[in-house]
Amino acid sequence: MNYLTKTTGGVVVLRVLFLIYAIWGFNWVVMKEANFFFPPVTFSAWRFTVGAVVLLLFNAWLHLPVPPRRYWPWIVVTGILQIAFNNAAIQVGMVSLGAGMVAVLNYSMPVWMALMAHVFLGEHLTRRKVLGIVVSMVGMCLLMNVGSGGDVGSILLTLSGAVAWAAAGIIIKIQDRRMKKKDCSLIQYTTWQMVVGAIALWLYTAATGVGTVDWTPLSVGCLAYNGILASALAFFLWNYLLTRIEAAKAGIAVLGVPVVGVLCGVLFMHEALTLASAAGMIMILAGIVCIVRKGA
């Protein structure tokens, strides 16, 4: 990963990336526990509400104002795409698709981000990038033990969530180039993006039914982890990563999250680690290294 480090001026980006791996990877275990206490979309609404409140308090502590009006159209768009629509699509897709299939479809995001970055950001889609994406996505299919088949509507909906996530990343990348940091810093942008996403998710749950929540110390702990770490902190780190390296590289680099997630399942939930899963991990890591390192 020496190229990634050199092009971003130090080891900060690598630390951010590994912190994202740790937070979102372990969250696969936390989310499995949370499913016993919360209806899926309701949990997403709660977690991003907690995340938004945490970020709002942090903004108040730093005496950061509400961003100027000219930034709000893009804050609203990215909040709906990255926070609300993507997470709702995942949860709805879970109803008729397996968890592995949903994970693979959602983490097809790097494919769409690389294509969009080629068109809108001038990040050329080189053979090395294509190779890294293909190897990583094949590895994802092996890792998640995905077979063929499934409801076409659910597949398209989950894929659209991945496209929305990618599109939000491209918009954030473009906005970072245009934003005056004294007017709207990244922490302000992330905060209000999460506020918009949380509101949109509550509107969705109000229209479809909130469901019953079983409030226990464990469910509160799952919500606290998701709200504070997996939402407030991790999404700020993700937005930071997008503004520091090429969008395609950020997208493929985040594929390390499923690898950590599966390993956490093995360590903490005693899930089996198959030969296919191990091969998938190796392929994902090989794809990440292929796309972030300089040279062939």
Image (spheres, rainbow, N blue to C red):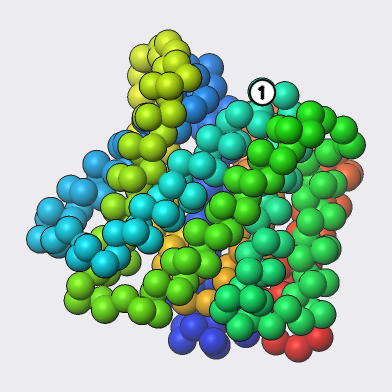
Examine the rendered structure and indicate whether residue 183 appears above or below residue 160: below
> Residue 217: horizontal and vertical position, in percent?
36, 19
**What type is the residue that disc 1 sits on?**
Val
Residue 226, percent from left and from top = 42, 38
Residue 208: in sight, yes or no? Answer: yes
Give the vertical position of 82 relative to 43 (above or below). below
**Relative side of 155 to 174, left or right:** right
Q: Which residue bears the numbered disc 1?
A: 95
- On-image quarter of the N terminus: bottom right
The correct choice, above or below, for 182 with respect to 62 in the image is below
Q: Is residue 27 visible?
A: no
Count the labels in the image.
1
Quarter of the figure with the C terminus: bottom right
Within 10 angstroms of label 1, few (less than 14), some, or many (20 or more) residues? Answer: few
Q: Residue at x 67, y 69 (%)?
A: 114
> Residue 221 falls in which quadrant of the image?
top left
The residue depicted at 64 percent of the width and 76 percent of the height is 119
**Residue at the (52%, 25%) spot, across then down:** 40
From the top left corner, tell me how far across and down residue 243 is, in percent. Answer: 45, 73
Compare residues 257 and 76 and report the one nearer the observer. 76
* Helix, strand or loop under label 1: loop
**Residue 235: image location, x then y, percent:** 42, 54
Asked whether, in this view, residue 130 is left or right of residue 29, the answer is right
Relative depth, front residue between 30 and 41: 41
